Amino acid sequence: MAAFLQVLMKKKLVLVNCFRENAQDKIKGYHAWLKAGAAGAGIELAILDARDREALPLAGESSAVVVSGSQKMVGDNDAEAGLLDFLKKYRRPLLGICYGHQVLARAFGCRVKKDGQKHLGDEEIMLKKADALFAAFPAVFRMRESHEEIVARDGALDKNFLVLAENSTGLVEAIVHREHPFYGVQFHPEKSGEFGIRLLVNFLRLI
């Protein structure tokens, strides 16, 4: 019985590496974060690596997908066409981080643009709507940021997503698709300590 339950608890997650430079080194932090989150969620997680320029054939076998950050700029149309197409068709739980959040929004027609400043370091995040991704979170918390583009508030965003969190100036920090289990977070939970792991645990409990 114990062995049977262990098989049931094992999940496959595809980690999409979107980095251009030093991709193998930069993705290591995501692996450590995913392992910590799996331990916190009490599941055995098989992490399958894929690149954004690939056709993502492994995703069809997965329980969930995480799309990484990147040095690329979505607002400059620096996003792989295959990844955009995949994001429109995938239906299982997905979490986009920073660039992954922006490219998720772009896949559904939302505008991504330069903010006019660089967001580096910890930033205050405020929850706007209750959601399972932020279960047991306080109304205000801090997460690590590293970006200069943002998802703009426009008709496409309102049509396709709910805004779950903002920063102190009202910029979009977290979204969820209105029909599919797709989440995007502008901040970097893999670099945000306890709250970052808590967010991942909540996401893994959705799969």
Image (cartoon, rainbow, N blue to C red):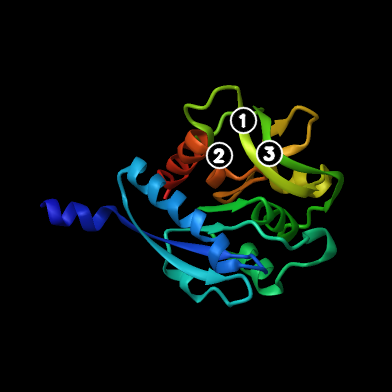
Q: Nearer the viewer, residue 205 or 24?
A: 24
- From what the image shows, is residue 119 above or below residue 77? above
Q: Which of the numbered marks, if any, corresponds to residue 121?
A: 3
Near mark 2 (Cα within 10 A), the count class, few <14, some 14-19 or many ≥20, is some
Report the residue that reaches farthest toward the top: 139
Identify which residue is drawn at 65% across, 43% down.
187
The CA span between labels 1 and 2 is 8 Å
The CA span between labels 3 and 2 is 10 Å
Q: Secondary structure at mark 1?
A: strand
Report the residue that reaches farthest toward the left: 1
Q: Nearer the viewer, residue 146 or 166?
A: 146
Q: Amino acid at mark 2?
A: Ser
Identify which residue is drawn at 68% across, 45% down.
186
Query: Could you say which quadrant of the image residue 83 lies in?
Result: bottom right
In this rendering, which labeled residue sits more in front, label 1 or label 3? 3
Q: Which of the numbered marks, if any, corresponds to residue 43?
A: none
Near mark 3 (Cα within 10 A), the count class, few <14, some 14-19 or many ≥20, is some
Q: Position of residue 48 (x, y in %)?
A: 43, 67
**Label 1 or label 2, whichever comes before in sequence order:** 1
**Label 1 or label 3, whichever comes before in sequence order:** 3
Q: Position of residue 176 (x, y in %)?
A: 62, 44
Q: Position of residue 151 (x, y in %)?
A: 77, 47
Report the residue that reaches farthest toward the right: 116
Residue labelled with disc 1: 142
Identify which residue is drawn at 82% across, 53% down.
111
Q: Amino acid at mark 1?
A: Arg
Residue labelled with disc 2: 192
Near mark 1 (Cα within 10 A), the count class, few <14, some 14-19 or many ≥20, is some
From this viewpoint, is residue 3 visible?
A: yes
Q: Amino acid at mark 3?
A: Gly
